[in-house]
């Protein structure tokens, strides 16, 4: 067991080193220790969710601190995406409660979550494929608009200056994620990796406090993963955005995250810093399949 | 954390007068009647343009999807503020400012600021491998560095040098990463810092303005140094030959590290006083060229080759009716009908797509174009004219050349060598 574990740990470290630039990684880790936040941004307490008697999530509790990158990992069917859906209100948990930014609720609709500063990307892309990159990013700015639909339709009152402000904000995100070249391209015609970046741009355009990323690197090659890792770290560092992400590539997770939560069959089996989780026998067993 | 510097030295502050900066600078540039004597250095030309066409657009840079612009007066003021900051860090005559940047106005203005103080702007190609830069940086031991962003600063850190001042234009990730304790300064802050302290131009015509570096086949570092006089002589020749004036629009679309760019774009920009445009980034330059429609294009064989390939890749499939129409229109020796119809149906739209609609000075600097590419542009009605790449590379260990280069071989009055057989 020990030797297998060592191999797992070594592989994870090697991958992390390869995928995340050394300086960036050092910064992320330094930041994690240096900026210990006073209060959690997100707290889940005893969350349980079931679908017609099938338990997807059972009694899960953990906290995400402000400014950290938290990774949710676990084998397929562990309940990671369901948990993300509970956090942003797509699913309503039957038990437990969620505190976000100092406010505790048992139920929250997706629109409320967005208004309160939670944005997300999806495992399977959910973009407007017939629209341009710029227009897709602008849709992420909808909640920032103050003008009425009538003002917007007739371009009266606040609409015109607001359009300029929204465009500038969208352009800043486009510049930040280096997608200027494709600004006017139809999203449906872009390669998959770029579409993932556009989806991230749209989420970022809403200026979220909490960014939920559901497998942001799925289907990407090593180079694209490295690029995406860098963008996620930059978002966290430059804007202070708290990130919760689901990722299967353990190397990426270990290099990117300040905090890792491990799920297996709807239960939490690990929670802590990457180094601690990597050493946790329950986590190793779940990943190596010896437990079930 | 990033270490901030105070560019206003006590010595300078004591010497400052409160006279309006623009007036003092104009006086410093033109003690005699302005038009009487041609300025002898690049910063003096900047001041002349600032005096003669203060409000006219000098530089345009696409950022956040919008063309942002600077007038000649703003450009001159910005250069003066940067020169003040450089001076405060100890930068003086003969000192070197290394610039590692993609084409952007900040890099150009920083180069002019270094030259203002009598220094040299050494341009390194940001697209080259980091290892090559580290060796050159160690050899140069620059007093100041303009690093575009985080990646360029990381290269500087890897070289273990600590220049007196490191100016960066893109602050992303820089503030939280400075283990080497570099004296980092944000360009935007330096450029905005008010100064009423006039500092006269200290550049000399016979001193080096720009230096370029490359690796020879033997692995040795070679350098090319160009004086103010040489640049202005060649720039003047181009301006006269191509009849360039202040109405031109040019696009600086190459990495900011080629001597051809200094000779045939930067010097003519200052002499003719036209508008120099910078693309959003290198990957958007073809889009930006199309949007802008520059009248002056100073490109290399790679520039024209890339455009040729871009057009070929987007033409209709060979054998299709549309492709046959294109081939028919691009015939080398069209008759009258074909010439007129071809112009309206194919050649003009193609020039539009490439951004060559308004181009009246398509210049080629350096290596000649392959014949197929040359023919393609000729068929479109774009007569690419070759200008000599007068690069003289020498071992960088040799003593720097600070004298005026020997006079170039006699050229016709317009500076143009017929038949395109230019010196390389």
Image (cartoon, rainbow, N blue to C red):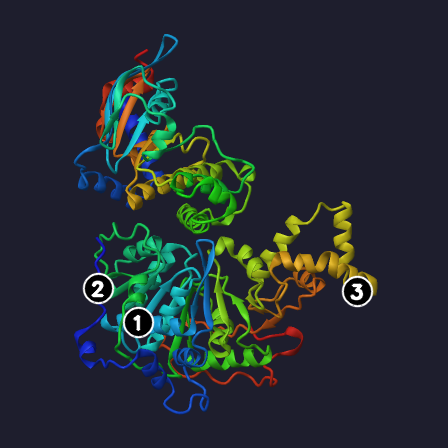
Instruction: Give the mark nearest the N terminus, 1 or 2.
Output: 2
For the point 45% across and 91% down, which residue is it? B36
In the visual, does B340 lie left or right of B14? right
Place of residue B20 in the rendered image (x, y in percent of width and height, measured from the top left): 30, 80
Mark 2 packing: few (<14 Cα in 10 Å), some, or many (20+)?
some
Chain ID of residue with mark 1 = B
Place of residue B405 in the rendered image (x, y in percent of width and height, measured from the top left): 45, 82
Q: Nearer the viewer, mark 1 or mark 2?
A: 1
Query: Under tag 2, what secondary structure?
Result: loop
Give the residue at mark 3. B333
For the point 35% across and 34% down, which residue is it? A115
Query: Where on the picture, by quarter, is residue B162?
Result: bottom left
Give the residue at mark 2. B5
Q: Nearer the viewer, mark 3 or mark 2?
A: 2
For the point 42% across and 43% down, which residue is it? A147
Is residue A278 visible in this depiction of the protein?
no
Place of residue B368 in the rendered image (x, y in percent of width and height, measured from the top left): 61, 66
Give the residue at mark 1. B81
Instruction: Give the mark nearest the N terminus, 1 or 3.
Output: 1
Q: Nearer the viewer, mark 1 or mark 3?
A: 1
Compared to residue A149, the image places residue B39 above or below, namely: below
Residues A185 and A225: in front is: A185
Is residue A110 visible in this depiction of the protein?
yes
Question: The N terminus of chain A is located in which quarter?
Answer: top left
Q: CA distance from mark 1 to mark 2?
A: 14 Å
Chain ID of residue with mark 2 = B
């Amino acid at each position: 067991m020990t030797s297998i574990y060592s191999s797992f740990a070594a592989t994870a470290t090697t991958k992390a080193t390869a995928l995340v630039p050394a300086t960036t990684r050092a910064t992320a880790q330094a930041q994690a220790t240096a900026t210990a936040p006073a209060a959690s941004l997100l707290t889940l307490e005893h969350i349980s969710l079931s679908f017609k008697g099938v338990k997807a999530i059972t009694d899960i509790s953990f906290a995400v601190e402000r400014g950290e990158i938290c990774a949710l990992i676990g084998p397929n069917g562990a309940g990671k995406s369901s948990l993300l859906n509970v956090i942003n209100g797509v699913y309503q948990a039957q038990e437990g409660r969620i505190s976000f930014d100092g406010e505790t609720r048992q139920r929250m609709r997706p629109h409320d979550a967005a208004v309160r500063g939670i944005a997300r990307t999806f495992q399977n892309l959910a973009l407007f494929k017939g629209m341009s990159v710029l227009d897709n990013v602008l849709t992420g700015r909808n909640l920032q608009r103050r003008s009425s639909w009538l003002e917007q339709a007739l371009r009266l009152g606040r609409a015109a200056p607001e359009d300029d402000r929204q465009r500038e904000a969208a352009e800043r995100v486009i510049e930040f994620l280096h997608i200027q070249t494709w600004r006017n391209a139809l999203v449906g015609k872009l390669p998959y990796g770029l579409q993932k970046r556009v989806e991230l741009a749209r989420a970022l355009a809403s200026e979220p406090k909490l960014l939920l990323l559901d497998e942001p690197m799925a289907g990407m090659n090593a180079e694209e993963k490295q690029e995406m890792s860098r963008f996620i770290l930059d978002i966290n560092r430059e804007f202070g955005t708290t990130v919760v992400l689901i990722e299967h590539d353990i190397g990426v997770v270990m290099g990117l995250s300040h905090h890792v939560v491990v799920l297996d069959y709807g239960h939490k089996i690990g929670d802590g810093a990457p180094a601690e989780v990597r050493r946790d026998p329950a986590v190793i067993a779940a990943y190596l399949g010896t437990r079930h | 954390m990033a270490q901030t510097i105070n560019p206003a030295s006590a010595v300078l502050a004591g010497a400052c007068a409160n006279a309006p900066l623009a007036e003092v600078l104009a006086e410093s540039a033109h003690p005699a009647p302005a038009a009487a004597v041609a300025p002898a250095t690049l910063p003096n030309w900047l001041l002349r343009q600032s005096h003669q066409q203060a409000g006219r657009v000098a530089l345009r840079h696409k950022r956040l999807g919008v063309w942002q612009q600077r007038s000649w007066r703003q450009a001159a003021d910005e250069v003066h503020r940067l020169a003040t900051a450089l001076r405060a860090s100890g930068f003086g005559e003969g000192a070197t400012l290394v610039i590692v940047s993609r084409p952007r106005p900040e890099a150009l203005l920083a180069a002019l600021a270094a030259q203002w103080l009598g220094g040299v702007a050494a341009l390194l190609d940001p697209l080259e491998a980091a290892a090559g830069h580290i060796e050159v940086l160690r050899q140069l031991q620059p007093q100041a560095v303009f690093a575009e962003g985080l990646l360029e600063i990381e290269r500087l850190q890897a070289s273990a040098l600590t220049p007196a001042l490191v100016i960066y234009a893109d602050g992303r990730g820089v503030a939280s990463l400075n283990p080497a304790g570099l004296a980092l300064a944000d360009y935007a802050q330096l450029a905005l810092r008010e100064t009423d302290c006039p500092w006269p131009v200290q550049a000399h015509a016979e001193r080096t303005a720009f230096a370029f570096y490359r690796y020879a086949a033997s692995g040795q570092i070679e350098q090319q140094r160009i004086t103010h006089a040489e640049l202005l002589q060649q720039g003047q020749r181009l301006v006269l030959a191509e009849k360039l004036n202040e109405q031109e629009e040019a696009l600086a679309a190459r990495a900011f590290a080629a001597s051809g760019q200094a000779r045939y774009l930067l010097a003519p920009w200052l002499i003719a006083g036209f508008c120099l445009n910078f693309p959003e980034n290198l990957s958007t330059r073809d889009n930006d060229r199309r949007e802008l429609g520059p009248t002056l294009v100073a490109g290399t064989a790679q520039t024209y080759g890339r455009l040729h390939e871009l057009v070929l890749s987007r033409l209709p499939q060979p054998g299709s009716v549309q492709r046959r129409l294109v081939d028919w229109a691009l015939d080398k020796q069209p008759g009258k009908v074909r010439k007129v119809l071809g112009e309206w149906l194919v050649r003009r739209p193609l020039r539009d797509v490439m951004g060559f609609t308004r181009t009246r000075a398509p210049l080629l600097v350096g290596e000649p174009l392959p014949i197929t590419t040359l023919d393609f542009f000729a068929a479109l009605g774009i007569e690419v004219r070759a200008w000599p790449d007068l690069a003289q590379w020498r071992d960088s260990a040799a003593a720097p050349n600070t004298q005026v280069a020997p006079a170039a071989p006699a050229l016709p009055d317009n500076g143009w060598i017929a038949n395109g057989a230019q010196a390389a």
